[in-house]
Amino acid sequence: MIWRVEMKSYHILNNGAQYGPYPQDQIVLMITSKQIKRNDLCWTEGMANWTPIDSVIPLPPVLPPPVPFPQSPQGIEVSGPWFLYIPISRLIVMSLITNGLYQYYWIYKNWRFLKDRDGLAIMPFWRGFFGIFFVFGILSKIKNDKSLNSFATGQLSPGVLSAGWIILNFISTGLGWASDNYLNLFGMVLSAINFLFLLPAQSYINQVNDARTPRPSYTPWTTGHVVVLVFGLVIYALLLIGMFAAK
């Protein structure tokens, strides 16, 4: 004896018109190809009422729509890193060995990203150079950026972080002008560790870029990185020479 399993066929009600009957597998294909919708009504013999398809027939899960790349005003997709995408270790090490100078470069590069992506009429170099006036702005832009927030909501506190960064900069600068060499050295240390107030923003940028598919590569080492590194080391050396020469 040959056993035959009968697959149910359903009538479909779509936009007021009735179609079918169709077997289940064909209905699934029709939904996948968007010929009909998951919440269209279906009916087969034995059912008391017309019922939404997804309440009757097992369907594949609904996948979330892909998050589009951010676009410039010219409609060009930004497929590379979003903002300055670097390892946390690079921010820390570069800040330490450049006596905090890299943090101004960090501000510049993130403003530069926004200028290129959004077509802003700004001068990123000067926003980095006068970082104490623009650090709050860039931290706010990072926290509220729509592209970043499409992956994860920014949990930064731009006011607190920028205030801490600015205050520590003023303290370290003041100590640098002191006549005591130990105070000078302490000021250099404070300037170097000021990156702590930028870490939450960098962690957020990295979290989002890490979650993208495909994950972009880290922002490469550029000529700007090298210039900042060399210039920072020279300043470091001059400060140390000046401290020991004054003894």
Image (spheres, rainbow, N blue to C red):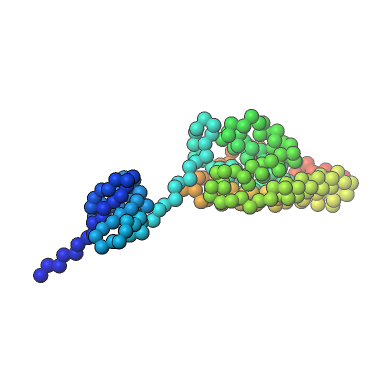
Q: At x 39% / y 56%, what residue is drawn?
A: 61
In the image, residue 48 above or below residue 133: below
In which quarter of the view is residue 229 placed?
Answer: top right
Q: Is residue 91 left or right of residue 13?
A: right
For the N terminus, which image quadrant?
bottom left
In which quarter of the view is residue 177 placed?
Answer: top right
In which quarter of the view is residue 227 placed?
Answer: top right
Q: Residue furthest front?
A: 48
Q: Is residue 161 left or right of residue 185?
A: left
Expressed as whole percent of the image width and height from the top left, the position of residue 89 reads 62, 52
Q: Is residue 184 left or right of residue 31?
A: right
Mark count = 0
Expressed as whole percent of the image width and height from the top left, the position of residue 9 reads 23, 56
Q: Residue furthest bottom?
A: 1
Which one is in front, 80 or 241? 80
Question: Does residue 100 appear in the picture of this structure?
Answer: yes
Q: At x 59% / y 48%, what residue is drawn?
A: 205
Question: Does residue 93 appear in the picture of this structure?
Answer: no
Which one is in front, 13 or 152? 13
Expressed as whole percent of the image width and height from the top left, the position of residue 132 reads 75, 41
Q: Is residue 44 left or right of residue 94?
A: left
Which one is in front, 141 or 134? 141
Q: At x 57% / y 47%, what residue is drawn?
A: 149
